[in-house]
Amino acid sequence: MPEHTATSRLRLFGLCFFLQILNILLFAVFVRYSPESSPGLCPSRLNCSRRNPDSGFQQPRFQGVHIQVLLSLGLLVAFLSRYGPGSAATSILITAFAIQWALLIQGIFHFFLNGKIYVGAQSMVSADFCTAAVLISTGAVLGRVNPVQLLLLALLEVTMCSLNEYILLSLMGVRDSGGSLTIHTFGAYFGLVVSRLLYQPHKDKKKREEQQDMGQQGDVFAVAGTVFLWIFWPSFTSTTTFHDNAENWAVLNTYFSLVASTVATFILSPVLYEESTPRMVQIQDATLAGMAVMGMAGEMLVTPFGALIAGFLVGLISPLGFRFFTPVLHSRLKIQDTCGVHNIHGLPGILGALLGTLLTLLATADTYGDRLELLFPLVAQGSWSVTYQALMQLCALLLTLLLAALGGCITGCILKTKMLRGSPDAQSVENTVLCEVAEEECEPRASSKELGTSTLV
Amino acid sequence: MPEHTATSRLRLFGLCFFLQILNILLFAVFVRYSPESSPGLCPSRLNCSRRNPDSGFQQPRFQGVHIQVLLSLGLLVAFLSRYGPGSAATSILITAFAIQWALLIQGIFHFFLNGKIYVGAQSMVSADFCTAAVLISTGAVLGRVNPVQLLLLALLEVTMCSLNEYILLSLMGVRDSGGSLTIHTFGAYFGLVVSRLLYQPHKDKKKREEQQDMGQQGDVFAVAGTVFLWIFWPSFTSTTTFHDNAENWAVLNTYFSLVASTVATFILSPVLYEESTPRMVQIQDATLAGMAVMGMAGEMLVTPFGALIAGFLVGLISPLGFRFFTPVLHSRLKIQDTCGVHNIHGLPGILGALLGTLLTLLATADTYGDRLELLFPLVAQGSWSVTYQALMQLCALLLTLLLAALGGCITGCILKTKMLRGSPDAQSVENTVLCEVAEEECEPRASSKELGTSTLV
Amino acid sequence: MPEHTATSRLRLFGLCFFLQILNILLFAVFVRYSPESSPGLCPSRLNCSRRNPDSGFQQPRFQGVHIQVLLSLGLLVAFLSRYGPGSAATSILITAFAIQWALLIQGIFHFFLNGKIYVGAQSMVSADFCTAAVLISTGAVLGRVNPVQLLLLALLEVTMCSLNEYILLSLMGVRDSGGSLTIHTFGAYFGLVVSRLLYQPHKDKKKREEQQDMGQQGDVFAVAGTVFLWIFWPSFTSTTTFHDNAENWAVLNTYFSLVASTVATFILSPVLYEESTPRMVQIQDATLAGMAVMGMAGEMLVTPFGALIAGFLVGLISPLGFRFFTPVLHSRLKIQDTCGVHNIHGLPGILGALLGTLLTLLATADTYGDRLELLFPLVAQGSWSVTYQALMQLCALLLTLLLAALGGCITGCILKTKMLRGSPDAQSVENTVLCEVAEEECEPRASSKELGTSTLV
């Protein structure tokens, strides 16, 4: 084993070193700061507000962007309640690498001109969206992969995710400001397919049960994650919406959705499990699901009760998924879903996309007013009918699922075949052992242990 | 017991379900997004900057509001150091419900037009203020009520709190931007009266002692809560003040107050308790008290040293209250104050209101300049004298105390008589047991255990 | 011992009381709110946008300042992973006192007019920068000083730090917006010199080993600290840069630097220690180092890959410093560096200053455009050559080291001679004991214990 560990350590060392040097070289050759971010440097030959049809996208709100470049961190905090601090180190490595890589790949798609990639605050936000998708996928496979595999997964997923985003937003003219499709759906199904390909029948079972219940410390993280999400996420979903006033709807709709989703968890918890109040991790899941469903529809909903209903339904569906669907996934489809990303991100993302499609179909100049121009410029200009736009939104869902499955397949095969399969992260094993110790002290929480296992078998 | 628990679970299930469906229906019938939040949709018949005398109130700063809609979360984090993560779930349920309900009730008072409630970012902020008052009241009764009772308490308190706020701010023309009266004083005395009516002599004593000392984990939460409050609260108190520049004073005064209050805690702690440095929970209490006292006076104070003195005094009074007044409350008045809200919110709120009254009396056009128009429009217009305005501020204090006591009485009676008294939250009991285990490991902290009990008997 | 503790308690009581009353009196006599923060109150005799050559500095962005007045809190959170919540109380006392004192001292240097100090949001930010330097110094001596000594250290360091900042920024015209010199270098070397003078060979050894490894709880704090720094720090470094667009570079450069620094830690960790992934505390150190190096250079770097390289190098140097330089510091120079501030703040600060000097030397109107006017107004006006400006930046480094050493000497001597040496903070000892208990439970983490000691001997 120590021999083995030494090899795995050296492999991680080598890969990190290689990738970081590669990033530095690519940045040195290609990446420059956007002249837009420095007044008076914008040469006339470079039209400083070009490319995207929606001009607002080109004027990132510089002030707010400080805080908003942390979507992925929000997820990271949220996931800690399941992963534990041992795996936090790996997650941060993934984040640090994926942000650089996403800047490069997305830059090629969106900000490429005269052989240079011009980055600015907007690029950081886009890169962060992509990193969030990677972290979601990580949630499906964590505990069964080592850091080297995770780095390769990040490398491949960022590429696929950027491609998907480029096709959807730039080529197809789809609106998905909060990433119901590009982040949540793509990340979840990509991760699930990778998880399927890495399936190991005997080895993982015991470990996963331990991993999924961190006892009291998990609760502390879950509280922190929930509060963090309540505070910051509504801003994220509105990052890429544009005018100061229009933005409001996305923020408020997201709030309404997460509030209703939280109450829904309290309704189902006493029925599904033998507990009077749900555990904090479940509340956090409800928060995430309530936000995922508002990703696309957030800026389109014109009535608050729509957001309440959507959040309420998704708050019911997500725990039901954990109770009834995750075991089926595991036993029939042989997909292990460590953190339940299918229920938290996959299903709510799909529902959000369907809701967005429905709302697009109902969009009229009457209800939207000036907003129509901003949301669906092609519809407002008369080039497209709302039906066509809605069809596009629907196609985008199917395309996202297709690309996620395809990308997951490729990634899973590479991770499997390339002799990369070492023992998973030594530290996460340690961590698991710690959890066991911690749990034995916490006899009164036995019910939570049962809960942990009941969702699996 | 399992029979009993099953009933209590079903009751919670039923109540949550009923209330959420009710909310959705009421939202569907009454609530629409404010046309103000969507330019070009404001019909001419709806004057888009109407109602409140202070016009600034109608122009919520949309950008900043993302972060500011979390006053109640700040409190939630702060309270975790005493409640523990077990009760966090219940607190989040209360928050999620109270926000929706407050939007409805406050909407009826403030944003009602042509049979519809028009909500926007401003409504979210107001609803959050109200939710904060509910969480403060929760602090007085926690550990002795079950989630069903807490939901009913939230239902009733939000109604009373909105009524109080409407009378004070809209009818009486009182200035209370940071909620010294409407949040802190109202929440604290409402909770104390409910606590009095739910008094149970034998049963609670032991449990409370355990509840009030969470050992090491409580410290972790207290550190998080304190940092959170230092970062975000000064922004809250200035949410409802208006012009970008005027806002400054409220922020800076709040900073000065909390800084002085923190130092004061270090002065009293070695004298009152046999410890060289205070525990983190006490520092957090000082932070909260220092902020409560600046609720009304924050925007009125024209000199920094005034804020320092106010914070310093309240930082001395709050620990003295814990040491000498809380035991009296308990033994003589039979009021159990689980988290000491009387010392943290009640007294500082009253002192803040008195200070605000004094400052109103001293307000002149010389010292305030353009600000007078913004702070006291009726005084600036010459309709009212400063004496009359000060009298109003003072009457507002008395009215708040009256309404809080009345509301608390009604709520307490309902919670008591309606056969709602089940066993308190099963999870919080579990949590208590966990604390005991944790404490036995921590023998060196025995002094803190003594501290916990010495404040009680 | 109890006798002794009582004396130490009374001494803390007396000093806190005296200092707070002194602060209140000085504030009452000298400090007023800046008329700039209240429109219409600015008398004609007081030129409301005066003093500093860079006019932008005089227009603090009031909106963003709420969040940015927490630089010191960021450090505080970061340090908790090493100090533990027991010492958090003392750190908060230091912060509360240092902010007030810094407002006074810096006010005398920067905002003094007609016998009054005019404070505003900008003063709070400056005071917070100064407090950050104090907290860095605290990191070098913590565990070996009592709260009384720390208060005196804060008193003296704030004075020296403000003097240094005044000479650098106002007299010498040096650019150091993120505080590579004024915060990181000054704070680190001041603390190290004090640590040298307080050296006690026998007593401290055992305690420090325990102090430096907090086991699992430390990890929780390190995760929180890292996330906090990733979110908020990039905004800090750009607080004192000016135009909305120019600001971008500092933010983005800081992001790039910390991302590369984080990856670098993952490269070195498997080589230096026998672990596959670094511990969270090491990642947090990398984050801090990556930010310290961008303090001065952040707003000057015109290419993203420069920030990547700088971050990457400093991410390699910082762990190497911990592994090889800290033991030398301890054994040869008899400097105990409790939290390794030399590696996290000292070295990166110096490297950042050298990088800034180099970049100044390379500054041309071509690459900077309008920015040159903002960054180096004297160069843009033609009064100075870039060589002269670069020389100034270099002199500023030497002067900072000199003043830090001088100030540290004076402070160390006073702390040593004045019969202030009591037993260190009783609570931190308690805390240490708690850690020991916690560690014995965590046998699987034995490797981390080894790590803790291996960095020492």
Image: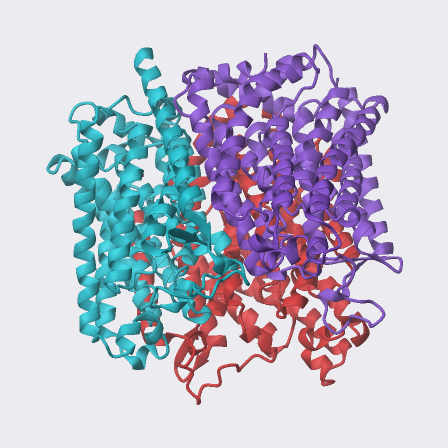
Chain colours: A purple, B cyan, C red
Residue sitting at x 70%, y 12%: A203
Instruction: Locate residue A328, reporting x and y percent.
Output: 63, 15
**Does A359 sit above or below residue A283?**
below
Q: Give the quarter of the image for residue B148.
A: top left
**Does C154 sit above or below residue C49?**
above
Farthest residue to the left: give it.
Answer: B332
Instruction: Locate residue A135, reporting x and y percent.
Output: 67, 36
Farthest residue to the right: give it.
Answer: A115
Q: Is residue B254 visible?
A: yes
Instruction: Locate residue C269, reporting x and y percent.
Output: 71, 36
**Does B40 sit above or below residue B336?**
below
* Residue B24 in the figure: left or right of residue A33: left
Q: Total label count?
A: 0
Farthest residue to the top: give it.
Answer: A202
* Residue B440 in the figure: left or right of residue A390: left
Q: Nearer the viewer, residue C249 or B364?
A: B364
- Image quarter hosting the C terminus of chain B: top left
Q: Nearer the viewer, residue A286 or B52?
A: B52
Farthest residue to the bottom: give it.
Answer: C45
- Image quarter hosting the N terminus of chain B: top left
Residue sitting at x 73%, y 30%: A190
* Residue C118 in the figure: left or right of residue A101: left
**Does B413 sit above or below residue C61?**
above
Q: Give the quarter of the image for residue A54.
A: bottom right
Instruction: Locate residue C402, reporting x and y percent.
Output: 61, 66
Q: Nearer the viewer, residue C300 or C94?
A: C300
Residue sitting at x 42%, y 33%: B217
Q: Nearer the viewer, residue B210 or A136?
A: A136
